Image (spheres, grey):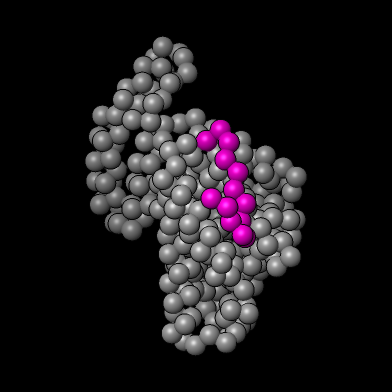
């Protein structure tokens, strides 16, 4: 499938999705959101894809935010529908069943920050700037930012960032837990690819259940989450790959996972 606003490259089980509007700082408009939704739907169904890296074209921006031109003249009901479409995209990424690494190569503001937060984890360039500046437009975050940011960095830090609309640099984002690691700009994609390759060597069945335990467990009490984990531990333990992994460890050889 070809796209107007995104680039897709798949090799060795790793899909790299690049938002390709560098002249617009890769801003999210309706076309980008629709194409990303279609692309991630296709990646979910593609068994050859084991890990996804999401990034932005150019050196300035991951995604600088929503396309303000689409927001300026929208009515309240229209904005609600825009929010629902954006949130559907974020859910499709968060619940892909495969790890998604955000390679934040520049500005990740508003919808761009929300897009990165929907990914499984985030690597950032030293030049990256992150934030939710919607209050400066008289708006609030609408693509899940008010919900995911507190879960990542805590209520106080999230409230400060949302209410001030301020930006933070990559080092501060790493300090508060918004990004996992920070790299020199020319090392960012190599780091993301290396991590993706390490993950791709695992059993996709095991990865899927691990993601399920983390994702669903976050919305449960600790006790319920541990019960969920125990049940999934039993399911995973009954898979061929679990038996292969344990045998390979005892035999001091590389496991040959069959994803079942």
Span colored in magenta = 1-13
Q: Is residue 119 above or below residue 111?
A: above
Near-viewer residue (168 or 108): 108
Q: Residue 179 in the image: x percent, y percent?
A: 58, 53
Q: For residue 245, which quarter of the picture?
A: top left
Near-viewer residue (251 or 177): 251
Q: Residue 17 in the image: x percent, y percent?
A: 58, 50
Asked whether residue 256 appears in the rendered view, the answer is yes
Q: How many marks?
A: 0
Residue 8 is a magenta residue: yes
Residue at 43% x, 64% y is 88
Q: Is residue 220 left or right of residue 79?
A: left
Residue at 39% x, 26% y is 258
Residue 183 is a magenta residue: no
Asked whether residue 199 appears in the rendered view, the answer is no
Q: For residue 25, which quarter of the picture?
A: bottom right
Q: Is residue 137 left or right of residue 253?
A: right
Residue at 29% x, 36% y is 233
Residue at 59% x, 48% y is 8
The residue furthest top is 251
Near-viewer residue (61 or 69): 69
Q: Residue 254 in the image: x percent, y percent?
A: 47, 18
- State which quarter of the image contains the C terminus: top left
Q: Residue 15 in the image: x percent, y percent?
A: 55, 43
């Amino acid at each position: 499938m070809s796209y107007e606003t995104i680039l897709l490259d798949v090799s060795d089980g790793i899909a790299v999705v690049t938002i390709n509007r560098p002249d617009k700082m890769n801003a999210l408009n309706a076309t980008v959101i629709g194409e990303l939704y279609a692309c991630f739907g296709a990646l979910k169904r593609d068994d050859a894809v084991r890990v996804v890296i999401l990034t932005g074209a150019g050196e300035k921006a991951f995604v600088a935010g929503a396309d303000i031109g689409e927001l300026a003249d929208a009515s309240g009901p229209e904005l609600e529908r825009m929010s629902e479409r954006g949130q559907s995209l974020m859910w499709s990424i968060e619940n892909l069943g495969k790890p998604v690494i955000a390679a934040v190569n520049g500005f990740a503001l508003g919808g761009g920050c929300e897009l990165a937060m929907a990914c499984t984890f985030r690597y950032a360039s030293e030049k990256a700037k992150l934030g939710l500046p919607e209050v400066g437009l008289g708006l609030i975050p609408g693509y899940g930012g008010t919900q995911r940011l507190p879960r990542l960095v805590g209520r106080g830090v999230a409230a400060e960032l949302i209410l001030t609309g301020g930006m933070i640099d990559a080092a501060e984002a790493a300090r508060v837990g918004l990004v996992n690691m920070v790299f020199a700009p020319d090392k960012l994609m190599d780091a993301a690819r290396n991590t993706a390759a390490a993950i791709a060597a695992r059993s996709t069945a095991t990865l899927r259940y691990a993601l399920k335990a983390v994702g669903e467990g976050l919305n449960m009490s600790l006790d319920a989450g541990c019960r969920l984990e125990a049940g999934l531990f039993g399911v995973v333990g009954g898979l061929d790959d679990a038996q292969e992994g344990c045998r390979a460890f005892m035999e001091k050889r590389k496991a040959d996972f069959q994803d079942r």
